[in-house]
Image (tube, rainbow, N blue to C red):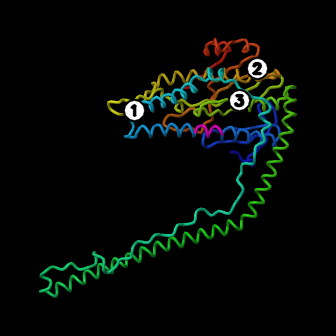
Amino acid sequence: MYDKEALEEFTTACGLKRYRVPVSDPALNRHRFISSDTPEFTLHKAALQEKLWVALAEQRAEEKRRRLGLEMNGKRSDLTARQKQKIAEDRTVMAREEFSHTFNTLEYGLHHPLDFNWDFFRTSMPFSVPRPSVSAGKEPTPPIYPREPQRTDFAYTPKYEAMDVLRPGRKQQKDKEAQERFREAHKHWQRLCGRMKYIYDEQMADHTRKLRQATENLPKELAAWEQAKAEYEQIQEMSMSIVQAKEEALAQHDPHAVLDYFDMALATSSYPAAFPHSFEMDYKPATQRLIVDYLLPSLKALPRLVTVVYNEVTDSFSDQIITVEQQAALYTKLFYEIPLRTFQELFSLDTSDALQSIRFRGYLFLEQAGAERTNLPPTCIVDVKAERSVFTGIGLRESDAISTFEKLGGVIHSLV
């Protein structure tokens, strides 16, 4: 989601004047700034980013439902051992797919090259804000009152014994006690029903007030919605005409066209849910260098599960996870692979030779001891530059990521 009211003008470190707006998706816990050289195209790009994240959130939700479904089915007592073994196998497949996608990011990128061009920007996004309608929420449900006590109820009838006939005073005492029990029960019933009716009447009065207020506000809300929809559609129409101009400008290495194109290209790159995949770009026209400031994933967010085993003897499932040390080693490998994958994806899309080099700076939020989160800005952990002439001569499929990274002169700073 994004708020066009948050649109602001800014100047990049390379001196480019642009507009930006924050875009976020709570379901994915992702956030990044979208920018361009005009307010209209900035908002158009924001809508496209929103669409990408909505689709990804739906995919993640489906994976979560499937995973939860397997876990719940595993607890059923009516399943056979073979059926539970199949559940363990299916959970293992899901775990290993996530594990491979997370820790083999360079290999994944090489096997799934980006299919991106200017047609991506020609997607006309429908206005996503729902049309206002009169609504005050669900109408309160009338209370279901408890049964009214009756004098003839068993609890309020005296319990005589044979000797009570011979002792009138004792019989009268039991009659009196029974009548008192009934009076107290009936008073309690009246108070309870009165309280229930009072609460219901208050809820109905509040509902009626909200309904009346919503009805009165509807014309104003509809007018505002119609205006916002018209403005949005106007921006969409203007953006369609801008796309062609930007496509031509990219061939001339226009810095704004360069940033818009490669920014959204990288946004379409598929990364696991554990990755923030949040980044900002800048461009130096004089040297044709693209700068990518990329937020790296945190160690704690990465998966450790690799296998789920079902034990028929104990009728239980057990999770096989990698050690903390193994996870840390794989995590460090990502610092080498993410920038190389970024170089590969961006250089491969640069058919206009607008990028002579790319500088990748990877940032990480470092946690302070005893604190879950820190308000400090992220720290630069990875810094590496790739010259086009050098990088395109490297065969990434045959090369080791660490040696390639070091060949490019990359630096990984200590996390301490």
Q: Residues within 10 Å of mark 3 (few under 14, many from 20)?
A: some
Vertical relation: 146 (above or below) 106? below
Amino acid type at circle 2 is Ser
Callout 2: helix, strand or loop?
strand
Give whichever of 249, 146 is nearer the camera.
146
Looking at the image, is mark 1 or mark 3 earlier in the sequence? Answer: 3
How far is mark 3 from mark 2, CA to CA? Answer: 16 Å
Residue 358 pos. (x, y %): 74, 22
Q: Residues within 10 Å of mark 2 (few under 14, many from 20)?
A: many
Vertical relation: 253 (above or below) 10? above
Q: Is residue 188 left or right of residue 228?
A: left
Picture disc at residue 317: 1
Callout 1: helix, strand or loop?
strand
Picture disc at residue 228: none
Q: Residue at x 61, y 70 (%)?
A: 208
Q: Are marks 1 and 3 in contact (CB under 8 Å)?
A: no
- The mark lying in front, picked from 3 and 2, is 3
- Give the magenta range: 55-60
Callout 3: helix, strand or loop?
helix
Residue 48 pos. (x, y %): 73, 39
Give whichever of 370, 224 is nearer the camera.
224
Q: Are marks 1 and 2 in contact (CB under 8 Å)?
A: no
Q: For residue 123: magenta?
A: no
Q: Residues within 10 Å of mark 1 (few under 14, many from 20)?
A: some
Which residue in the structure is indicated by mark 2? Answer: 357
Which residue in the structure is indicated by mark 3? Answer: 266
